[in-house]
Amino acid sequence: MNRATRATATALALLGALSLTACTGGGLPDKSAAKAPATADPATRSDLKPFYGQRPAWTDCATDGYECARLTVPLDYARPGNGRTFVLPVARAAATGPGKRIGSLVFNPGGPGAAGAGSLEEGMDEAFGAAVRARFDIVGFDPRGVGGSVPALTCEPTEEDPTAEEDEAPDGVAPLYPRTEADRSAAAAGARTAAEDCEKHSGPILRHVGTDDAARDLDILRAALGERKLTYLGWSYGTSLGTSYAEQFPRRVRAMVLDGAIDPSLDWRQRVLSQSAGFRRSVDDYAERCSEIAGERCPGRTPGEIRALIERLYQRAEREPLPVAEDSSYAEYGGMDATAVLDAVSMAMYTPEDQWEPLSEALREADRGDATKLGALGDEESESEETGSEDTDTAEGEEEEDASPDASEAPAVPDDNSDAALTAVNCLDVPHPRSVRPYWDALAPADRAAGVYGTAGVTAELTCRDWPSGERRPHKVAAEGVPPVLVVGTTGDPSTPYAEAVSLAKQFPAGMLLTYEGLGHTAYGRGDACVTAKVDAYLVRLERVAPGATCRAERDKDQNQS
């Protein structure tokens, strides 16, 4: 992957929690899509009965304590009988109190691009409260095209690809705010190359990995698990998946928690402005509150010094990549460019309790001339994901004889295809403007709203300009008949701003909002006792959350809840 293509992928990773909703060139939501059309129950369709009639063949996973299986779903729901399918990995952690078991709870960890089965084997069940683990089997699955799905998405050539070195884009990247025609041409060319790479290596499945189809897979999984109704928890992008399920199958929902909400009524431009402003606020929070978490490791004595240091690094990296050690993953690109620095800073906003200390040390060293630790912040997460992938590969090897016939026909994909899935799902879920003009028109408003976080976010959307279009449009939730849905919003969330949680809760019939006054991305599973108690009570006993319910982070409260 050349630097221009890498910059586009990195910028899209900055929008990692993003489930884009459709665009009409930056205008108002399409009210014609506000009502979901009535459709026949898919489970009664003769051509879908073979899929709905599946029962998982559970075997021990490669990781002790978990069971694994596979689920087959149609590649194209318009033609489910044509023999083309996705085979999806599924994993479960059995309820710890089997005598009191309620059923299965399916979760999605986010992304788009996060593999639910692999996440579970890495211990994702520990994110759930003890009461929930006692009463439910915790079930994760890899969405279509993601992780161990067969086939799976890839947007980059493999080592065996004889054309891997062809069609290299110009070496170089656009600045965080492309102002000149040359900068904008470079940004558009890099985005076009990224889109062409995805089409080249995953073309046959690109049009079939959208959220609405993944939600239909979720209903087949519900049936396969033997559940009459679905109990579900989605984090971040998982809220988009849950919302789509609730709209398509409102009367099949038992309980649904959407944590780190994405508002489906926003178009592409509104969503970019919302999220990029969230990242900017979070970086300001870091500057203001660094000493509370990182103490003496903070890279400045005052918030002003910290802000100035970060801005200084961005400016330096736009002129010349920041130096890194020879063994850094950025060494082959000559160091960390401005987009990579922005990405590292932004990603550290997700879990301040874990990431602000290493970020602080990395920023201090980068300012002194060595960005190796700053580049390694993302590498540590990637290494963890790769370890999980190796475990999964071993498990699949052991069961090779029982694998789907599709497995032998699937193209080789990287161990971690989350970046490809992120791009594919985000772009397919929303039709973007085909002209470059709406993107350039959005730059100045994005700069005013969120500075370089906004302009980089707009530039990242350029890849979707050359992408296949889906049928979704911005719309208010249409889920008549769905039971009360619990939306959880974190006031300091960088990636899914709190305002979107407020909006989504209002859109659901009898929707409930639980506010977490704290920093970081999402709330449930991060250790707050108040959030855990309220979410668990809803999932287990269907206890409603009172209007105005609020939990406060430990460092911000005198009392645990109000």
Image: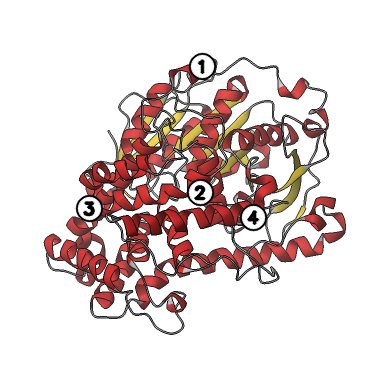
How far, Cα to Cα, is label 3 from label 1? 39 Å
Q: Which mark is residue 539?
A: none
Residue contact at pointers 3 and 4, CB within 8 angstroms: no
Residue contact at pointers 2 and 1, CB within 8 angstroms: no
Q: Which mark is residue 35?
A: 1
Number of other residues with Cα within 10 Å of mark 2, as a class: few under 14, some 14 to 19, many 20 or more: many
Residue 52 visible (yes or no): yes
Find disc 3 in the rendering and name its residue: 285
How far, Cα to Cα, is label 2 from label 3? 24 Å
The residue type indicated by label 4 comes to Lys
* Residue drawn 21% across the image and 70% down it: 299
Among the two numbered marks 2 and 4 on one chain, the one whose residue lies closer to the N terminus: 2
- Nearer the observer: mark 3 or 4; the answer is 4
The residue type indicated by label 2 comes to Gly
Q: Considering the numbered disc 4 on the image, is that residue within a helix, a strand or a loop? A: helix
- Nearer the observer: mark 3 or 1; the answer is 1
The residue type indicated by label 1 comes to Lys
How far, Cα to Cα, is label 4 from label 1? 36 Å
* Residue drawn 80% across the image and 36% down it: 54
In-image side of 488 versus 250 (left or right): left
- Residue 384 against residue 474 in the figure, above or below: below
- Nearer the observer: mark 2 or 3; the answer is 2
Find disc 4 in the rendering and name its residue: 200
* Residue drawn 62% across the image and 42% down it: 209
Among the two numbered marks 3 and 1 on one chain, the one whose residue lies closer to the N terminus: 1
Residue 91 visible (yes or no): no
